[in-house]
Image (cartoon, helix red, strand yellow):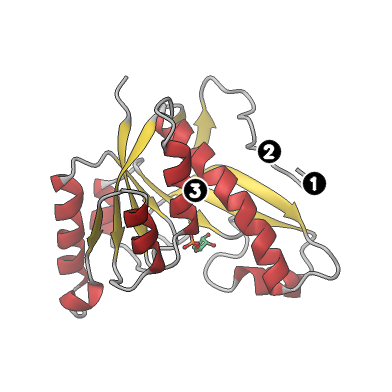
Amino acid sequence: MSRKRVAVLISGRGSNMAALIEVAKDKTFPAEIALVVSNRPDAGGVATARAAGIATEVVDHSASGKDRAAFERALQGVLEKDRIDIVCLAGFMRLLGAGFVSQWQGRLLNIHPALLPAFKGLDTHKRALEAGAKIHGATVHFVVAEMDSGPIIVHGAVAVRDDDSEATLAARVLEVEHRIYPLALKLVAEGRVRVVDGRCLIDGVPVPDGASLGPGR
Ligand code: GRF
C-alpha cells in the first residue's frame, strides 16, 4: 500500500511537526510528510522543516485580512496541488471553518495539550494546576467544526506533581505529545480508526502500543 501524503500545519516552533518528520523518515511508516504549511512566515518550524528537506509553503492569513474563506481557499489550493491525503494540525493557531473541516472530515487531526474533553482552549497547563488535577496530558483527535471537540484518537497521560510549575508540567506533556502524535497518525494512515457515534474505534490493535501511556511511562 502506498504511503499517505501528509501536510503538517504549523504556526510556531514545530516540535510536534519535527516528531512527525522524524518518525516518517522510516520508509515502513505508513505516511510521509510531503509538506509543511505555516500561516506565519516567521514560524520557527519552517526553518526546521526546510533543514529536514521537507517542502514548505507559507499561506499568510494576514494577506486575506478578515476573510477567512479566502485564507481557507488558499490553504485548500496548496493541499490539493500537493495531492495531500491527511492534514495534521500541530500548534496551528487559526480556527478553521465548517466548510474546510467538512472537506477533510476523518483526515484532519489536531493535538491538544490536555486530556480532552477537559481543558479545551488555551492555558491548559495553568488551568490543570489550578484545578488540582492529578492526571494531565495530551490528546490527538479528529477536527470537527467545534473547537477541541472531535473524536479522540489517542490520549497520553502524565502524573501531576505537587511541585510542578506550568513550565515543568508543559515539558513532560510535550514529551508525551511527541509520542502520541506519531502513534495516532500511524493508526489513521493504516486505516485502523473508525468513528462510530462520535467515538474512535481502533481496528486490529486491541490495545494500541503506547495508547495507554500513563504516569511513569
Ligand atoms: C503543543 O503543545 C500542541 O499541543 C499545541 O500547541 C503546541 C505546539 O507546539 N496545539 P509545537 O509547535 O508542536 O512545538
Residue flagged by tag 1: what amino acid is it?
Answer: Gly
Q: Distance between the residues labelled 1 and 3?
A: 21 Å
Which label sits in the foreground, 1 or 2?
Answer: 1
Label 3 or label 2, whichever lies nearer to me, is 3
Quadrant including the C terminus: top right
Identify the residue at image location x=28%, y=71%: 41
* Residue 58 visible in the shown view: yes
Residue designated by label 1: 216
Report the quarter where the N terminus lies: top left
For label 2, the residue is 212
State yes or no: discs 1 and 2 in contact (Cβ < 8 Å): no
Residue 127 appears in the figure: no
**Residue ID at (74%, 75%):** 130
> Helix or strand or loop: what does disc 1 sit on?
loop
x 43%, y 29%: residue: 29
| 183 vs 208: above or below | below
Rounded to the nearest angstrom, the CA distance separating label 1 from label 2 is 11 Å
Q: Mark 3 points at which residue?
A: 19
**Other residues around mark 2 within 10 Å, as few (<14) / some (14–19) / many (≥20):** some
- Mark 2: C-beta under 8 Å from nearest atom of ligand 1: no
Percent from the top left, x then y, of residue 146?
A: 41, 60
Indicate left or right for 89 with 182 as reference. Answer: left
- Counting every numbered tag in the picture gives 3
Quadrant in the rendering for residue 65: bottom left
Image location of residue 21, percent across then percent down: 42, 45
* Residue 172 position in % (x across, y down): 69, 58
